Image: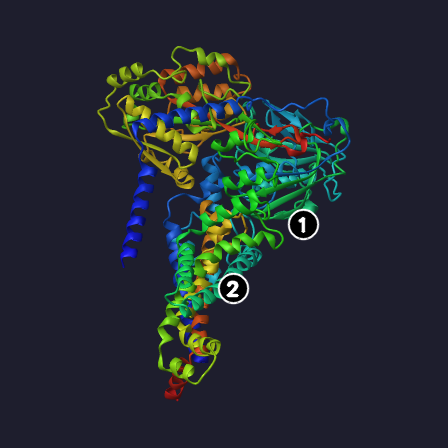
C-alpha cells in the first residue's frame, strides 16, 4: 500500500508539473496586456513599458517560464500578486478556510441527505414516496446553483430578513451558500445511492440475510450499503474535488472572499501569479482528492486491499 | 400506461403553451404591451424627475454640520475589491480612489483647476525648474509619527520606485530643503494645467518610520481624517474617525472632515445584491443600482421609504472616434462626418439609462467647458441629421463595406454599440460590433488593424485634461494619438489649450472648431452616477465629482 501511495504521489507531481506548464503557456498567449490593465486607462506608453519591465513581462517565453518553474518548484514560491501586492500563498491561506467551510459543510450535507434520500427511495422502490424523493432530486439537479442562490436571497434576506445576503461574519453568513452548494450534490448522491442499492437489492447474500431473520436496518446498513458504496464513493470523490475548484459562482453571488472569488478577480485583472497559483492549487487538491478516494476504496473493499497486498507479495 | 401517456401529453402541451407565451404576442397584445411599457416608463421618469437635484439639508432638523456630534455608522456598497491598501498602488484603480482619501492625504487636492493645500501650506516658484513646497510643521499620523520633509521625499521616491508613478513626466526629483520644505525639480518648465496633479495630488504622504515598521497593505497608518480599523481583502474595509486629526478646525478642508464615526465599505460583487442590501438597510449608499431598479428607490417606489436617488453627471466621457490611419476607410473625412451626423446622442443616452447625452465636444461638468460650443452650426453632436449624413456619405468613397466597431464589453457600452449599429444602418453604413473584455480591448485599441470605430471612456481633472488622453500624440509612444491621427496642427492647438497661458475660452473654442472641421472626434455621453442613499444623509459630498467623501457628507442626527 505504501508503494502504491508513493507511486501515486510521484504521478501527482508529474500532473502538477504538467498543469503548471499548460497554465503558464495559456496565460502567456492570452491576448490582453496585463501591464495595460494594471496601469489603468490614464497611463502613458512609457509608464506601461516600465511596469512591463518591472513585472518581467518583457522577457521571452522561455525566460519567463524558467523563472516561474524555478520559483514554484525549487523555491516553492508562488510569487506576489501584481494587483494585491501580497504573497499569493499568504492570501490563499487566508481565503482557503472560507472556501473549505462552505465546501466541506456542503459535502457533509450532500453525504447525509443524499445517502438517506437514496436509501429511502431504493427501499421503497416503485412506491409514491420513491417517485417523490427522486422528483425532488431531479428538481435539485435541474436548478442552477446561482439561480437557487438568488431565489434564497430574495426569500430569506429580502422578504423575511432572517439571513444576511452577502459577506462574511458569523455562522449565519454561511447558511445560504452552504445550502446552495449542497443541493446539486444531494441530488446526485441520492440518485447514485438509489441506483447502487437497487443493484445489490436482489443479490443472494441479501436474500440469505433476510432468510436468517436479520432486521431490515441491519440488512440495509450492514449488507446492502457496504456493497453498494463503490460508485457512491466515486461520486463523492468527484464532489470533493469540486468543493474548492467549483466555488467561484457561489462565492461571487454571496460576495464571499474565498479562493474561487480570488481566482475570478485575478482572471479579470490579468493577475497572472494569482491565476497560476490558484490553478496549481486546484490541481493538487483534485489529485489528492482522487488519491483519497482510491485509498477509501481499499479501505471499504477487501478485494482491492488484497490486490495491493498480492502485488507486494509478487514483487517479493 | 394510458395515464402516463396522458401525463406526457399534458406536459408537452404545458411546455408548448409556456414557449408560446414567452416568445410570441399578437399585434393587439403588442399594442397593449407597448402602452403598458410607456406607462411604466412614464411613471419611472416621474419618479426619477427630481433625481438630478442634489440633496439639501432640511434646516429644521439637527445635522452633524451644526453639531460636534458625529453620525454613528454608515455602510457603503462597492462592487470591486480594492485588493490592498498600500500607498503606492492607488493609481489605475477606482475602488481605491473611493476609499484611500479617507486615510491617506496628499500635499494638495486638485479642485476646479486649482491646487488646494492639504498637507502643504503652499508653494513657491524658485525658478522655472525648481519649486518649493512647504508643509505644516504640526502634521502627525494616526500612530503619532511627526511628518516632516524627509517623509515627503520618502513617499514620492517610494511611489516612483514602485513603478506606479504614472503621469510623472514633469517630475525629475525631490529633495529636502529644511525640516518642513521640499524642493521639486521639474524636467521642463511647468506650463500646462494639471501637470502636477499626479505628483502633488495623487501621492500619498506617509511616515517613513511607520511604513518601514508596519504593514501598509492591510493596516496603513496615515494622516487622514479616518484610520483603518479592519480590512478583509475582498469583503470589507472599516474606518474609524481619527479623533486626533492634526489640522486645526479653522483650517480644516471641507473635504477632509469626519462627520461620521464609522464608515464601512462592503464589497458586494453582484448589482442585484446591492438592491437587496439597500432595501433591507444593510447598506446606506450604493452607486451600483441597475438603472431599471432606480425608480424603486425614488418617490412612490417599493423601497422609497427611507431612501432616495441622486443622479449626477460624472466627469467622464464616452468618446467615439474613427480610425484615421492611412488607408483606413474612416480616414475619409466625409465618411467620418456621415457617421457623426447619423448618430443621435439623446436616443443613445435614453437607451443606456445611466448616461447624459453630450451636446458638444466635452463634459458640461467642467468649468472650462463652454455651452457656446453647442450653438456652433457645424456641431454634429447637437442633433441627428440623417439628410446630412447621407449627403456626406455620397461624397465619401464608402461602398457598403462593413466597419468594425470596437469597445470594451461593459453593459452600458454594449447598449450604445447596439444603438450606434442601428442608427448607422439607417444611414446606409454597415457596422459589426466587437465587444471585447476590457483587458483585451485596451490592448486591441492600440492596433490600427483591429478597428474602424472605437468607443473609449475617458476622464480627467478638467476639460482639457479629458481631451488629452485621446488626442495627444505623445500618450502612446507611437507618434499617433488614440485615433491614429498625426496632425501637427491638432497637437499644437492641444498643447496650447493645455498650457497655463493658452487655457482660454477663445483658444478652446478654436480647438473645438478645428476638430469639428476635420471630423476628428465625437462625444457620445457622460456616465451618470446613480446614487441611492438613505435619507440619513443630509448632503452628499464628492471628490472629483464621483468618489463619495462619506466623512464630509452631512447627516441628520435626530
Q: Which x, y percent locates residue B504?
A: 53, 14
Q: Residue at x 45, y 40 (%)?
A: A36
Given this view, does label 1 or label 2 mark the residue nearer the observer? 2
Left or right of residue B243, residue A313 in this image: left
Count neighbours of disc 1 (C-alpha within 10 A) and say few if under 14, some if 14 to 19, many if 20 or more: few
Q: Chain of mark 2?
A: A
Q: Which label number is shown at residue B328?
A: none
The relative height of residue A106 versus residue B237 in the rendered view (above or below) is: below
The residue identified by callout 1 is B214
A249 lies left or right of B216: left
Quadrant occupied by the C terminus of chain A: bottom left
Q: What is the spatial separation of the Cα atoms under label 1 and label 2, in whole angstroms?
A: 41 Å
Q: Identify the residue shown where x is 48% and y is 56%.
A: A181
Spot the residue most to the front.
B2
Element type where label 2 sits in the image: helix
Picture layout, residue A80 above or below residue B390: below
Q: Where residue B544 sits in the image (x, y, percent)?
A: 58, 28
x, y percent for residue A292: 46, 71
Of the pair B382 and B504, the residue shown nearer to us: B382
Q: Is residue B406 above or below residue A253?
A: above
Viewer-proximal residue, A224 or B298?
A224
Helix, strand or loop at label 1? It is: loop
Residue on which disc 2 sits: A108
Amino acid at each position: 500500500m505504501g508503494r502504491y501511495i508513493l507511486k501515486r504521489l510521484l504521478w501527482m507531481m508529474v500532473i502538477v508539473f504538467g498543469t503548471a506548464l499548460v497554465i503558464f503557456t495559456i496565460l502567456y498567449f492570452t491576448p490582453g496586456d496585463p501591464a495595460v490593465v494594471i496601469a489603468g486607462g490614464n497611463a502613458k506608453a512609457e509608464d506601461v513599458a516600465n511596469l512591463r519591465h518591472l513585472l518581467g513581462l518583457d522577457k521571452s517565453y522561455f525566460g519567463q517560464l524558467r523563472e516561474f518553474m524555478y520559483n514554484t518548484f525549487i523555491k516553492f514560491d508562488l510569487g506576489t500578486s501584481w494587483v494585491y501586492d501580497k504573497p499569493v500563498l499568504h492570501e490563499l491561506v487566508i481565503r482557503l478556510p472560507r472556501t473549505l467551510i462552505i465546501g466541506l459543510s456542503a459535502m457533509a450535507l450532500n453525504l447525509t441527505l443524499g445517502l438517506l434520500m437514496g436509501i429511502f427511495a431504493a427501499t421503497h422502490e416503485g412506491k409514491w414516496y420513491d417517485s417523490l424523493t427522486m422528483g425532488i432530486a431531479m428538481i435539485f439537479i435541474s436548478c442552477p446553483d446561482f439561480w437557487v442562490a438568488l431565489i434564497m436571497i430574495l426569500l430569506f434576506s429580502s422578504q423575511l430578513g432572517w439571513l444576511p445576503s452577502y459577506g462574511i461574519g458569523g455562522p449565519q453568513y454561511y447558511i445560504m451558500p452552504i445550502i446552495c452548494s449542497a443541493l446539486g450534490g444531494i441530488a446526485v448522491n441520492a440518485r447514485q445511492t438509489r441506483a447502487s442499492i437497487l443493484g445489490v437489492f436482489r443479490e443472494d447474500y441479501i436474500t440469505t440475510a433476510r432468510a436468517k431473520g436479520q432486521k431490515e436496518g441491519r440488512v440495509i446498513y450492514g449488507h446492502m450499503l457496504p456493497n453498494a458504496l463503490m460508485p457512491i464513493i466515486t461520486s463523492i470523490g468527484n464532489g470533493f474535488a469540486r468543493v474548492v475548484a467549483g466555488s467561484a459562482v457561489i462565492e461571487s453571488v454571496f460576495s464571499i472572499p474565498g479562493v474561487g472569488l480570488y481566482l475570478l478577480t485575478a482572471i479579470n485583472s490579468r493577475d497572472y501569479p494569482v491565476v497560476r497559483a490558484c490553478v496549481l492549487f486546484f490541481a493538487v487538491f483534485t489529485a489528492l482528492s482522487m488519491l483519497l478516494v482510491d485509498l477509501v476504496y481499499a479501505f471499504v473493499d477487501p478485494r482491492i486491499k488484497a490486490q495491493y497486498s498480492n502485488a507486494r507479495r509478487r514483487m517479493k | 400506461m394510458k395515464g402516463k401517456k396522458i401525463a406526457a401529453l399534458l406536459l408537452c402541451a404545458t411546455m408548448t403553451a409556456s414557449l408560446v407565451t414567452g416568445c410570441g404576442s399578437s399585434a393587439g397584445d403588442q399594442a397593449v404591451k407597448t402602452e403598458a411599457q410607456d406607462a411604466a416608463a412614464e411613471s419611472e421618469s416621474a419618479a426619477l424627475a427630481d433625481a438630478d437635484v442634489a440633496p439639501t439639508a432640511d434646516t429644521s432638523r439637527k445635522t452633524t454640520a451644526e453639531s460636534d456630534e458625529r453620525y454613528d455608522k454608515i455602510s457603503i456598497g462597492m462592487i470591486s475589491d480594492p485588493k490592498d491598501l498600500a500607498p503606492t498602488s492607488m493609481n489605475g484603480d477606482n475602488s481605491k480612489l473611493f476609499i484611500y482619501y479617507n486615510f491617506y492625504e496628499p500635499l494638495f487636492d486638485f479642485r476646479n483647476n486649482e491646487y488646494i493645500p492639504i498637507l502643504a501650506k503652499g508653494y513657491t516658484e524658485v525658478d522655472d525648474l525648481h519649486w518649493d513646497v512647504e508643509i505644516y510643521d504640526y502634521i502627525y499620523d494616526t500612530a503619532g509619527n511627526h511628518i516632516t520633509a524627509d517623509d515627503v521625499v520618502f513617499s514620492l521616491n517610494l511611489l516612483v520606485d514602485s513603478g506606479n508613478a504614472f503621469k510623472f513626466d514633469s517630475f525629475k526629483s525631490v529633495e529636502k530643503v529644511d525640516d518642513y520644505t521640499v524642493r521639486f525639480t521639474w524636467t521642463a518648465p511647468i506650463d500646462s494645467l494639471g501637470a502636477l496633479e499626479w505628483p502633488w495630488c495623487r501621492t500619498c504622504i506617509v511616515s517613513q518610520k511607520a511604513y518601514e515598521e508596519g504593514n501598509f497593505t492591510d493596516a496603513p497608518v496615515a494622516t487622514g481624517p479616518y484610520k483603518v480599523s479592519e480590512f478583509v481583502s475582498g469583503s470589507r474595509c472599516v474606518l474609524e474617525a481619527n479623533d486626533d486629526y492634526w489640522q486645526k478646525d479653522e483650517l480644516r478642508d471641507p473635504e477632509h472632515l469626519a462627520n461620521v464615526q464609522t464608515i464601512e465599505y462592503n464589497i458586494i460583487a453582484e448589482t442585484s445584491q446591492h438592491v437587496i442590501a439597500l432595501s433591507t438597510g444593510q447598506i446606506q449608499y450604493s452607486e451600483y443600482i441597475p438603472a431599471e431598479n432606480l425608480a424603486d428607490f425614488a418617490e412612490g417606489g417599493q423601497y422609497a421609504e427611507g431612501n432616495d436617488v441622486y443622479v449626477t453627471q460624472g466627469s467622464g466621457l464616452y468618446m467615439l472616434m474613427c480610425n484615421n490611419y492611412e488607408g483606413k476607410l474612416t480616414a475619409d473625412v466625409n465618411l467620418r462626418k456621415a457617421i457623426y451626423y447619423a448618430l443621435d446622442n439623446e436616443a443613445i443616452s435614453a437607451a443606456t439609462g445611466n448616461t447624459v447625452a453630450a451636446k458638444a465636444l466635452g463634459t458640461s461638468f467642467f468649468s472650462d467647458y463652454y455651452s457656446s460650443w453647442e450653438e456652433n452650426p457645424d456641431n454634429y453632436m447637437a442633433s441627428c441629421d440623417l439628410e446630412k449624413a447621407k449627403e456626406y456619405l455620397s461624397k465619401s468613397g464608402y461602398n457598403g463595406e462593413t466597419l468594425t466597431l470596437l469597445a470594451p464589453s461593459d453593459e452600458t457600452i454594449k447598449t450604445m454599440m447596439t444603438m450606434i449599429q442601428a442608427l448607422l444602418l439607417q444611414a446606409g453604413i454597415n457596422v459589426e460590433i466587437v465587444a471585447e473584455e476590457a483587458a483585451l480591448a485596451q490592448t486591441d485599441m492600440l492596433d490600427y488593424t483591429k478597428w474602424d470605430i472605437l468607443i473609449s471612456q475617458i476622464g480627467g481633472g478638467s476639460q482639457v485634461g479629458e481631451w488629452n488622453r485621446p488626442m495627444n500624440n505623445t500618450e502612446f509612444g507611437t507618434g499617433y494619438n488614440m485615433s491614429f491621427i498625426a496632425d501637427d496642427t491638432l497637437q499644437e492647438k492641444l498643447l496650447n489649450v493645455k498650457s497655463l497661458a493658452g487655457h482660454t475660452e477663445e483658444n478652446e473654442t478654436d480647438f473645438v472648431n478645428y476638430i469639428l472641421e476635420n471630423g476628428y472626434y465625437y462625444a457620445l455621453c457622460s456616465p451618470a452616477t446613480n446614487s441611492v442613499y438613505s435619507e440619513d444623509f443630509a448632503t452628499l459630498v464628492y471628490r472629483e465629482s464621483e468618489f463619495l467623501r462619506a466623512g464630509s457628507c452631512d447627516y441628520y442626527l435626530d
